[in-house]
């Protein structure tokens, strides 16, 4: 699958809740996992492959996971980490997010599940859930860093178009 990158309007659109987990959706999950591993990345939301449905896949080295209709229940603590995004390739920013994240949603069988994510796993949960709401990591930058990031993205786009 092609990963959509900064400037693609689909990345700014909120995803619709999933009503029914069927074979088509399970195929999407398999394709998303393969795309994430090929990139390589640790998480991938449906928007990033042009699908406006509330699902993301992830793997921080502990095996693949998927979450449908994710909802952040609770967060605590703070953790600063150099965060990147497959939709903003090559750029990394120190971003402060919660250190502990409690998330719930549905698993591949449509059963309710709940997870606790610490540091990197919690960050992946927050980052991918942001995507499902049409937000990018760029939205989490302070004004000066955001300005630098936008300049770098515009320069990259101009270089690719020339």
Image (cartoon, rainbow, N blue to C red):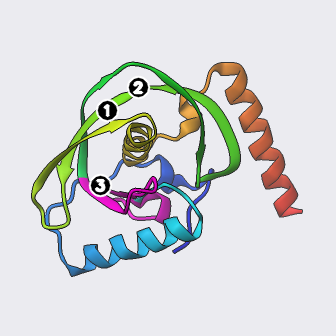
Residue carrying label 2 = 98
Where is residue 55 shown, x and y percent of the image?
A: 31, 57
Which residue range is magenta in the image? 46-68
Where is residue 147 shown, x and y percent of the image?
A: 73, 28
Camera-nearest residue between 65 and 23: 65
**Residue drawn at 84 percent across, 53 percent down:** 158
Which residue occupies the extreme right position in the image? 162
Quote the CA–CA distance across marks 3 and 1.
18 Å
Quarter residue 100 falls in: top left
Camera-nearest residue between 8 and 20: 20
SS of the residue under disc 2 = loop
Question: Where 140 falls versus 153 (above or below)?
Answer: above
SS of the residue under disc 3 = loop
- Quadrant that contains the C terminus: bottom right
Foreground label between 3 and 1: 1
Q: Is residue 148 magenta?
A: no
Specify whether 12 is left or right of 109: right
Residue 101 image label: 1
Q: Earlier in the sequence, mark 3 or mark 2?
A: 3
Specify whether 53 is left or right of 156: left
Residue 54 image label: 3
Which residue occupies the extreme left position in the image? 111
- Mark 3 surroundings within 10 Å by alpha-carbon count, few (fewer than 14), some (14 through 19), many (20 or more): many
Given contact means CB atoms under 8 Å apart, are the residues at marks 3 and 1 in contact? no
Camera-nearest residue between 158 and 85: 85
Q: Earlier in the sequence, mark 3 or mark 1?
A: 3
Quote the CA–CA distance across marks 2 and 1.
7 Å
Quote the CA–CA distance across marks 3 and 2.
21 Å
SS of the residue under disc 1 = strand
**Residue drawn at 46 percent across, 64 percent down:** 50
């Amino acid at each position: 699958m092609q990963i959509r990158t900064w400037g693609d309007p689909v990345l700014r659109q909120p995803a619709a809740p999933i009503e029914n987990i069927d074979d088509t959706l399970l195929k999407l999950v398999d394709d998303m996992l393969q795309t994430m591993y090929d990139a390589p990345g640790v998480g991938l939301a449906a928007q990033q492959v042009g699908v406006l449905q509330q699902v993301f896949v992830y793997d921080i080295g502990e095996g693949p996971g998927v979450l449908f209709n994710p909802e952040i229940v609770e967060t605590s603590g703070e953790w600063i980490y150099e965060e990147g995004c497959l939709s903003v390739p090559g750029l990394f920013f120190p971003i402060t997010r919660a250190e502990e994240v409690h998330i719930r949603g549905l698993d591949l069988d449509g059963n309710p599940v709940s997870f606790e994510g610490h540091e990197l796993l919690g960050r992946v949960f927050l980052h991918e859930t942001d995507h499902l709401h049409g937000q990018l990591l760029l939205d989490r930058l302070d004004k000066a860093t955001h300005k630098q990031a936008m300049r770098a993205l515009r320069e990259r786009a101009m270089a690719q178009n020339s």
